[in-house]
Amino acid sequence: MAALTGTLPTAVVSIRPAKRQARLNVVAQARGYNPQQLENLNSSTPFDNFKFAPVKEATVNRAMTRRYFQDLDNYAECDVIIVGAGSAGLCCAYELSKHPEIKVALIEQGVAPGGGAWLGGQLFSAMCVRKPADELLDELNVPYEDEGDMVVIKHASLFTSTLLSKVLAAPNIKMFNATAVEDLIVREDPVMGRYVGGAVTNWTLVSLNHDTQMCMDPNVMESKVLVSSTGHDGPMGASGVKRLAKMGMVDSAPGMSALDMNSAEDMVVRNTREVVPGMIICGMEVAELDGAPRMGPTFGAMFMSGQKAAHCALNSLRRQNVLKAPATPVRERELAHA
Ligand code: AHZ
């Protein structure tokens, strides 16, 4: 028998059930089908007879708010704050997920994390990654086509959704999305000088409305290390380094330079660093600070810069632990010779 094809006349859909069945039978027979076949297409699905258990609306409210406010309370002080959940920030978070003892807050101004990593260049699907950054793809089990010195993922979203799922599942990482970092906490220390001690936050929708409403003061989160991965200049991008430049904590933030894939990717990874005590930069924010070229649609440097930033953060935490440890004669001798 021929396969069922074609659509039914719309009039059939709107008439009463008995009449409708009769019409369907006629249509089915006219087209050479058994009427039961047509009826089966109309009938049951595995979801027809289910029923949810009753719920109290307030229970749903409390399930969300209790957790969110517990998180806000818990993350008022954390080890690492990552600002920006683009490819660099997410790679940094993923690397830190391997250290479950470290408490990480990932703050993203957008509702949807991922930054520019949902698509390749010019809104195309494929994502190009120069080697050896493909090692991360093997670790994540993201498939790709090998093209020699670079690999190509069939859709950037496949990479980003896989990475994001690992980061979000990590017990030591909490993502606060729809939350903007409006400013930095900067303190003075007799030994270190000025250092970054955390982030000044607000709901992004509030941040975007400071000029329409009065006095919407921000919140704060303290960190031992802040990783700034806010991408290149834009409404909120490069906000970390621009703040440092305004305060004279770095000479200037000239902005990224014109495209040169070959030098750009090496430079971004090489220059990923603790730029002032307590603050590490990675991803395109590095190019913004150093006037380095942009690389356009190749993502290897973003992966490796994010991974390197995680290691810089671990080093910074270790250094802070050493400095905070009570001085012993042996340690003082070690420090004197350091
Ligand atoms: O929403 C931003 C994005 O998700 C977020 N962000 C920016 N400012 C923020 C703020 N508070 C909270 N003040 C903020 N979040 O940071 C994320 C940056 O992601 P991105 O993808 O724009 O930057 P990236 O450095 O991770 O990756 C850059 C990818 C590029 S750009 C480029 C070129 O222009 O040539 N080439 C590549 C591969």
Image: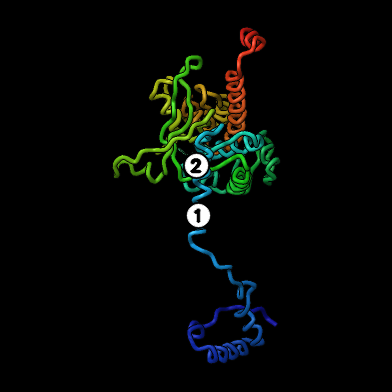
Which quarter of the rendered picture does the C terminus lie within?
A: top right
For residue 318, which quarter of the picture? Answer: top right
Q: Residue at horizontal 52%, vertical 25%?
A: 278
Query: Residue 77: which numbered mark, if any?
Result: none
Measured as percent of width and height from the top left, residue 43 is found at 61, 80
Horizontally, is 97 left or right of 228 in the view? right
In the picture shown, does residue 336 fall above or below 14? above
Amino acid type, residue under disc 1 in the picture: Arg
Of 85 and 181, the residue lying toward us: 181
Secondary structure at numbered mark 2: helix
The residue under label 1 is 62
Query: Is residue 260 at all visible to an observer of this figure?
Result: no
In the picture shown, does residue 177 fall above or below 252? below
Measured as percent of width and height from the top left, residue 160 is found at 59, 45
Query: Is residue 299 at all visible to an observer of this figure?
Result: yes
Of 178 and 317, the residue lying toward us: 317
The residue under label 2 is 72
Amino acid type, residue under disc 2 in the picture: Leu
Circle 2 packing at 10 Å, graded few (<14), some (14-19), many (20+), is some
Q: Residue at horizontal 39%, vertical 46%?
A: 205
Circle 1 packing at 10 Å, graded few (<14), some (14-19), many (20+), is few
Q: How many labels does the image show?
A: 2
Q: Is mark 1 within 8 Å of ligand 1?
A: no
Horizontally, is 237 left or right of 120 in the view? left
Measured as percent of width and height from the top left, residue 288 is found at 46, 29
For residue 7, which quarter of the picture? Answer: bottom right
